[in-house]
Image: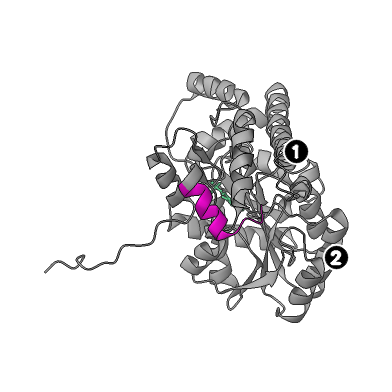
Amino acid sequence: VHRFVGIPTAPPDSILGLTEAFLADKNPSKMNLSVGVYKDASGQTPILKCVKEAERRLIENEATKGYLSIDGLPDYREQVRSLVFGDSLDAGRVAILQTPGGTGALRVAADFIVAQLSPTRIWMPSPTWANHPAIFAAAGLASETYRYLGSDRTSFDLAGMLEDLSEKTKPGDAVLLHACCHNPTGVDPTPEDWKAIAKTVAERQLIPLIDFAYQGFGDGIEQDKTGLNTILEAVDEAIVCNSFSKNFGLYSERVGSVCLIAADAETTKAAHSQLKTIVRTNYSNPPRHGGAIVATVLQDAELTKLWQQEVDEMRERIDALRQQFVETMKNTGSGHDFSFLLKQKGMFSFSGLTPMQVDELKSKHGIYIVGSGRINVAGMSEDKMDSLCQAVASVL
Ligand code: PMP
C-alpha cells in the first residue's frame, strides 16, 4: 500500500504564491508589490557593499567549515548584543542565540514558551504578519489577537490595544509586539504610545515577545530601538527576535537571533541552556556564513559606517517612493487622498485597496498586491510610478 497517496495539497503561501503567479505573468509592465524584499531603482535586490567587502575578507581568511556551537558564532552574538541592546542592559541578563533568520528565532521562541511557560497564550496584533499565527500554531502555542489597526484602516488604535491587553489577558500570557515598521500595516506606535503600552504590559505581567525584523527601516538604526527600550525599562523578562534579512539584505543567508532577557544572570544561564536544547533537536546549529558577515561588518568601524549609510539609503529611498506615490496619485485626479501613507513606516503600507480592487490590478494591469491591500513600497520604482498610479486610479 502507498501511505502517501491521498495526502491533500496544501494551499500555497499567501504571499510567496503571488510571486509564482507574478513570474508566470507575461505582461511586460508587470510590477510585484507583494513580497517584502527591498529593491533598488533598477528593480534589483542588491548585495550591500559592506557585505561584499566582508565576504571578500571572509573568503580570504576562512579556515574551516566546522560546525558552529549550538548558539552560533560568539563574535556575532556579541555584536547583536551591542547593536540591539547597547550598554543599557547588563550583559549577564541576555542570552543570545544565532538563528536561521527571524523566522527561526520566532520558532525557537515559540517552542521555548510552550516548553517552559505553559499554559501561556500569546496575544498578537490584528492584523499581523501571516506567518506569526502559523509559526505559533506549528509550535502548539495558542494565540489570540488584540486590536491594533483603527477602523479607518490607516491609524493606530492605542485605546483598543490597551483595553484588550488590560481586560482580556491573564498574568503570564505572552504578547507579540512589532518593534518598528509593523508588518503588514506600516502603522507604528509613537514614543508616547510605547510608554502606555509598556505600562500596561508591566501591570498585566505579560511577557513581551518583540519581533525586530526591520531595524533601520523606520526612523533609523538607533531611533528604531525606542519601543524596545521603553518596554525593557518597564519589565525584567522579555524575548526579542531580530533578523538581518532586510537591514543587511541577507535574505537567503538566513541570519537572525533569539535573545532572552531574564531578571538575573543565573536565570539567564538556565534559560539559555533550554533554548540550546530546542535548537539541538531542531536544526542542531545555525549556518556560519550570514553570521560571519554581520560580525565582520559590525566589528570594523569603517564597514559599520558603510552599513549605516546603506541602511539610511534604503530607508530614504522608500520614503521618497511614498512621497512620489502620494503626489502622483494626487495628479491622477482620482480625488482619493493617499497622504496617510506618509505617516507609515518601513517597507509596507496598508493602502486601503479592497480585495476586488487588488484582483483587478492583477488581472488587468499585472500589478501584484497582497489581498489585504498591503503594498510593499520598496517594490515601486520611480520610472513606473505614473503607470502604477494610473492603474490604481482606474480601479478606485
Ligand atoms: N518578522 C516579520 C514581521 C517579518 O516581516 C519577517 C520577514 N518577512 C520576519 C519576521 C522574518 O524574516 P526572516 O526569517 O526572513 O529573517
Quarter of the image for the N terminus: give it.
Answer: bottom left
Give above or below for 26 relative to 8: above
Give percent across and percent down for residue 4: 21, 65
Look at the image and give the residue range highlighted in magenta.
Answer: 351-363
Residue reaching furthest to the left: 1
Kindly tell me whether mark 1's CB lies below 8 Å from ligand 1: no
Residue located beneath label 1 in the image:
327
Q: Is residue 189 left or right of residue 374?
A: right
| Left or right of residue 392: residue 338 | right
Query: What is the tally of numbered marks visible in this picture?
Result: 2
Between residue 152 and residue 54, name the one nearer to us: 152
* Quarter-of-image position of residue 133: bottom right
Q: Is residue 113 magenta?
A: no
Q: Main secondary structure of the magenta part?
A: helix
Tags 2 and 1 in contact by the CB under 8 Å rule?
A: no
Comparing marks 2 and 1, which lies closer to the viewer? 1
Residue 330 in the image: state x and y as whole percent.
75, 42
Q: Earlier in the sequence, mark 2 or mark 1?
A: 2
Residue at the disc numbered 2: 196
Crowd around label 1: few <14 · some 14–19 · many ≥20 (10 Å): some
Residue found 67% across the figure and 55% down from its top: 185
State the separation of the CA atoms marked 2 and 1: 34 Å
The image shows residue 380, relative to residue 154, as above or below, that is above
SS for dot 1: helix
Residue 165, horizontal then vertical, whole percent: 75, 74
**Quarter of the figure with residue 11:** bottom left
State the residue in front, 23 or 129.
23
Question: Mark number for residue 48?
Answer: none
Amino acid under disc 2: Ala
